[in-house]
Image: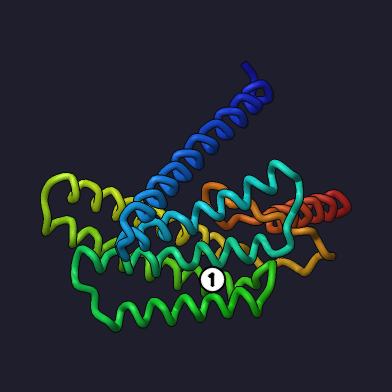
Amino acid sequence: MTRHNQQPWRDVENAILKFLTQGIYLLLFAVTLVGFARHRMLARLEVAALFGVLAAVILLQGFTQVTGIVLPWAATAAALLILAQPCLLLRLVGHFRPIPRLWDLAALATVLATYAVVILAGQPLPRAAAILLVVAFVTIEGVAAVALAQAALAIRGIARRRLIAIAAGSALLAAIILVAGVQLQCRPRRRTLPRWRICWRWDRQWATTWAFRLRRGCAGRGSSRSSRSS
C-alpha cells in the first residue's frame, strides 16, 4: 500500500482517536458536574470547573466543525478558558496540601494579566504576546504539577494513584505548550503577507495556527522560484 493510499486511513484513525478522547473528557466533566449537583462542596465545584474549561473548548470546536459557522469570538474565548486551567489546578492542589497564599495571589494576578494581553492584542496574537502566554501557562501548570506530585507522596491508596495521574497529565500538558512556544520562537521571521484568514485548530497541541503554515509555504515557493530564475 502506497503512502497516498495510507493517508486516508491515517486521517480516519486520527479522527476516531480524537472523537474518543474528547468524548471521554466530556463524560468526565458530566460526572464531576453531577457530583457537584449532589454534594454542594467547594472542592467538587473546583474539580467541575477544572474539567469544564477544557470541555467548553471542545464544545466550541465541535460546534464549528458540525455547523461550519466560525464564531468571531470563539478563538478569544477558547484562549481565555485554557489560560484559566493552571490557576484552577493550583486551587485544587490546596485541598491536598497547604499552598502559600502568595502562590494563589500570584497565579490569579498572572491569569488576569494574560487575559488583558489576549483581549487587547486581538487575534491572531503577536509573537511576543504568544510567548508571554506560554511562559505564564507553563510556569503555573508546572508548579501545580510538582505540588500535586508532592501531595501524592504523602498519602496512600487510590487517592495517591489519582493524584499521580493528574500530576503526570498536567506535566505533559505543560510540556506540550512549552514545545509549541519553543517552536514559535525558533521560527524565522517572515515579511508580513496580505491578510490571510486565520483558522485556529484546537487539536493535539492546542495552539497551532494555519497562518504559519501558509507563510512557510509561500516562503518556500518564493525561494524555489528565485533559485530557478538565477
Q: Residues within 10 Å of mark 1 (few under 14, many from 20)?
A: some
On screen, 66 above or below 170? above
The residue lying toward the viewer, choosing from 111 and 214, is 111
On screen, 225 above or below 103? above
Place of residue 86 in the rendered image (x, y in percent of width and height, measured from the top left): 40, 66
Q: Secondary structure at mark 1?
A: helix
- Examine the image and state in which quarter residue 215 appears: bottom right
Give the residue pinned by disc 1: 131
Colour setting: rainbow
Query: Residue at (27%, 81%) from the top-left corner?
Result: 101
Place of residue 76 in the rendered image (x, y in percent of width and height, measured from the top left): 63, 66
In the displayed structure, does residue 178 sit left or right of residue 199?
left
Count all numbered tags in the image, as a single digit: 1
Place of residue 126 in the rendered image (x, y in percent of width and height, measured from the top left): 65, 72
Place of residue 40 in the rendered image (x, y in percent of width and height, measured from the top left): 33, 60
The residue lying toward the viewer, choosing from 55 and 171, is 55
In the displayed structure, does residue 89 sit left or right of residue 16?
left
Query: Residue at (64%, 20%) from the top-left corner?
Result: 2
Query: Residue at (55%, 76%) from the top-left corner?
Result: 115
In the displayed structure, does residue 188 sit left or right of residue 80?
right
Q: Amino acid at mark 1?
A: Ile
The residue lying toward the viewer, choosing from 219 and 109, is 109
Placement of the C terminus among the 4 image quadrants: bottom right
- Examine the image and state in which quarter residue 105 appears: bottom left
On screen, 15 above or below 63? above
Q: Farthest top residue?
A: 1
The residue lying toward the viewer, choosing from 30 and 136, is 30
Placement of the N terminus among the 4 image quadrants: top right
